Image (tube, helix red, strand yellow):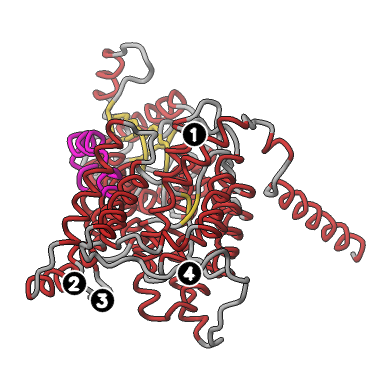
Amino acid sequence: MDQEASRKGRERLRRAASRTVELLPRRRDWTHIAAGRDLTAGVMVGLVALPLALGFGVSSGMGAGAGLVTAIVAGALAAVFGGSRVQVSGPTGAMTVVLVPIIATYGRDGVLVVGLLAGLILIGLGYLGAGRFIRYVPIPVVEGFTVGIAVIIALQQIPAVLGVRVHADNVLVLTFRAVESWAADPVWAPLAVTIGVALGVLALARVAPRFPGSLVAVAVATAANATLDWGAAPIGHIPSGLPAPSLPTVQFADLDALLLPAIAVAALAALESLLSATVADAMSVGQRHDSNRELVGQGLANLGAPLFGGIPATAAIARTAVNVRSGAASRLAALTHSLVLLLVALVATRWVAEIPLAALAGVLIATAVQMVKVSSLGALLRSTRGDAAVLAVTAVATIVVDLVTAVLVGLVVAGFFALQQTAKAARLDEVPLDETDHTDEERSLLDEQIIAYRIDGPLFFAAAHDFLLELAEISHVRVVVLRMSRVTTIDATGASVLADTIGRLEGRGITVLLSGVQPLHERVLSELGVYDRLAHERHLFTTTPEAIAHARLHASRVAHTPTHDTRS
């Protein structure tokens, strides 16, 4: 016994070691390097990422420096340990939406602890192989989620756009308070800066998509604000370089309260990162990401960033797209992006601190506009009522409630419409005995008061009631043969309704025979009492011809038996 337990223990250790090796970096991760293209792409993405990192740091409430640190540390760790060669990670608009209420409730250290916990959760998800579940998220949910995030990012910028300082947990309340405060004492300079930067970014993106238009627009706005003394408030002091790593301080009792926000952050990081990796695969030739390694890489990124004062991070779809379009071939490009930002943090924070908050707001509003693809959005809204409803519900829930709840609600609504469509596909048909025309034989069976039905498709809670309860009302026959070979799915509800239908028919003296039950369905039919409702255990047949032969024998016997004994 001890030897067997020891053997099993060694086998578990071997599997765990093998699983760990699968999730770690390997030499072939760096076999696709094209130094020229990768370095060029990395510099380009770094320039694009700089204003975004600063803006999302400010939007989160942790400050521009936290956003820059996150882009450097999380970007480098995810580049090395992640599951995609071309993915770029850092602070994102979706993540800042989640972080705002967390920092309002638990403060800066609470956000850092949430990041650490989320990192551990992501590593655990990757180790357990949860990456494969991303394929089950429907496109309307993704699009609705994206639209909702875009709206929230834009609304979050309203205080900076109007040059006012207001706070609120809910973005709609925040917007209302900002407009109310500005109306009492209007200031026009920040609004003008935001509009100019947003229009400049969108125009340059259309004319020269690979050009770092956001950086140019921010630089021009910063120079104009300083030279012409417009009075738009700047970012303010940003610490130079990377701070020394340290653990955040938090009361042990607060860990329970922080666990739920950490789960929300981890869920968002997993969802956004895997969606971004899927987009990267579609944009690049031969690129196929490892979803579980990507979760582990994002987990390590979220463990590393908070140690240096950064915020939780995720893969960034926009920056990843810039990376791919700029010709990135390997992880070197994303790593170069982090090095470019580190160089900025070491030597250029004095100039970065002069960037107007309104200019960063313009970059983020332009980013929000670019997130919404009008063509794909219109196609989904026109496709089916179900897709349109899922998209709209997910978008509204994202804005009104929170992102993780919105995705869950979207999945539930999408599941409802999927079940509805699946239920419509289930049919109960009176059919020929095989694929050829046997009209005469069918008529002969009817003359003998025998009828055969074939159930096609799923027999589950959304599909079972209507046609099976209609079947229960059949009269003027002696035997009903139910052909089960084309049933694709049976659940407890479907089996229970089938048992009830058989019981009703048998109770009226109509014998029911089952044919072609698939082996994988036998257990649920047996456990839910379907077989118990049959008049006799021999009323279960492998093939339809066998069932028909027995039905004829039974009908003949009933016709000549005054007591109409249905047992045979």
Q: Label 1: state its secondary structure.
A: helix
Badge 3 is on which residue? 167
Tag 2 and tag 4, C-beta contact below 8 Å: no
In this view of the protein, which residue sits in the foreground, 82 or 197? Answer: 197
In this view of the protein, which residue sits in the foreground, 237 or 170? Answer: 237
Q: Which residues are magenta?
A: 366-390
Q: CA distance from mark 2 to mark 1?
A: 39 Å
Badge 2 is on which residue? 173
Is residue 463 something that shows in the picture? no
**Residue 526 image offset from top left, x and y in percent:** 49, 50
Badge 1 is on which residue? 281
Which dot, 2 or 4, sits closer to the camera? 2
Q: Label 3: state its secondary structure.
A: loop
Badge 4 is on which residue? 262
Residue type, mark 4 in image: Ala
Q: CA distance from mark 1 to mark 3?
A: 40 Å
> Could you tell me which residue is drawn at 17 percent across and 71 percent down?
178
Q: CA distance from mark 2 to mark 4?
A: 24 Å
Is residue 548 something that shows in the picture? yes
Which dot, 4 or 3, sits closer to the camera? 3
Q: Reading the chain from its start, which is encountered first: label 2 or label 1? A: 2
